[in-house]
Image (spheres, rainbow, N blue to C red):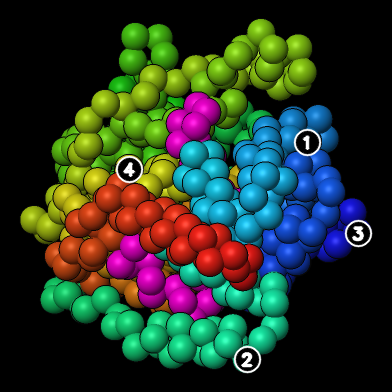
Amino acid sequence: MVVIVLAAFLASAAFAPIGIWYFAVLGYALLLRKLSSTIKPIWLSLLFGLVYNAIVLNWSGKFVGVLPWLLLSLLQSLFYLPVGIVAKRLRNIWWMAFTLLAMELLRANFPFGGFGWTRIAFSQVQSPAVKVVSFGGVLALSAITLVFAALLTRISIANLLRVTLISIALLFLPLNPQGSGSLKLLAIQGNTPSIGLDFNSRAKAVFDLHRDATYRFAKAKYDAIIWPENAIDIDPGAYPEVAQDIANLNFKTQAPLIAGVVLQHNGSPENASVMYDKNGDVESTYIKRGLTPFGEYMPLRGLAEFISPYAKSVTDFNAGKLLQVHKIAANPIGPVICYEIINDRLVREMAANSNGLIVQTNSATFAGTSESRQQLAITRIRAIENSRSILSVSTIGISALIDNNGRVVSQTKEDMQAYLKADLQLNTYSTWASRLGYFADIFVLGFIALLAFRRSRNGQNV
């Protein structure tokens, strides 16, 4: 049990706030080695999943309490049970690695649309293997990490040689090519008057902060000004004074505004990215398609309200149906709204229809935790995977400009009013991961399965 807990601590330490990528390799090496030799692999795999997810997702319980955090961690840990079952039946490390990957892909899509926040790849943004995501997607980076872990379960000259050769090959993977042209954008991190679950109870105050910050920081000419998710939590269509403020701001800055807006439609809210032209008129609207379960809608409402009193305060949002990009100076720029960043398909579709991405997010609900830094790492992975520069804008931080190879060009500090002057580089290159889509996942799983089959047929555990 001590070894399993240590393995979980190491694997979780690859994520922020510690963020040492190779701890994931060491952690999973310990896990695979222990599961291959213990008489209780099923329960130990469950324990690993529970401790690992509880540590990485500790930010999720800051304002809702311990019970929802533990239940989320427990739900995630159930996906590790098949790993223990495979370990018990086959005693083969490679089949365990295959099962880990299969379960990672499953939990990224199921239930409630999936929750892939703790995927191995999202801890590997500093890894020398990170470029592999542009060829095989997120699952390929998770697979490479597990391959290293599996080889390290038994230290031998042959395995060390394999690790060395794979590492050298990864170093020769090319970077994503640079595109041509750029957009001059201004990102406004307006901050909020409060944090926690009730941050938007003073919606007009949040809008005022972003409006005033824009007047303060917009001293030059920009192709567009970007506000984060929930910057306008009061529907301008229902409040003429807000709509007039937007029109006045756009006229003063002579730049379109792309803002996170909560709209009302048939009595239900919609989380939207809205582009207002220089006159303050709506030019394009994207309605968030990947809603946050238990945050923007409440699955199993009766059970959820029994578990947590906060569930009663959640109003179900309408989910968008259509992909919509914004045109900035005739260039298609795709909006990704917060939680959507962990959804492979939604990000891939938006990238395929745009020359750059903006991520509009709101971290006020989890202020003072590692959530924002973990999300920044995920966003950097997405930039590499799709070869798109990304401007990520948060209400309270971290806001950042990321190039199409995942490098942070500039970023803000948290919990303060700030801005970023961003030259968003445009790119039309389509990576192999983007072209292959789900087929990349099938190829990765097939390759690891073939490796496992050959090893087990030859009687080799490692």
Residue 365's quadrant in the figure? top right
- Magenta stretch in the rendered image: 108-136
**Quadrant of the rendered image containing residue 177:** bottom left
Mark positioned earlier in the residue sequence (4 or 1): 1
Which residue position is annotated with label 2? Answer: 157
Q: Mark 3 or 2, which is nearer the eye?
A: 2
Q: Earlier in the sequence, mark 3 or mark 2?
A: 3
Residue lying farthest to the front in this orientation = 458
In the picture, the quarter occupied by the C terminus is: bottom right
In space, the residues marked 2 and 4 are separated at their CA atoms by 43 Å
- Predominant secondary structure, magenta span: loop
The residue that label 1 is drawn on is 70
Q: Which mark is residue 2?
A: 3
Amino acid type, mark 2:
Ile
Q: Which is nearer the N-term, disc 1 or disc 3?
A: 3
Q: Which residue is mark 4?
A: 346
Is-magenta flag for residue 128?
Answer: yes
Q: Point out the frontmost of discs 1 and 3.
A: 3
The residues bearing labels 1 and 2 have C-alpha atoms spaced at a distance of: 42 Å
Q: Is residue 80 above or below residue 269?
A: below
Q: Amino acid at mark 3?
A: Val
Sequence-wise first label, 4 or 3? 3
x and y percentages locating residue 403 in the rendered image: 34, 73
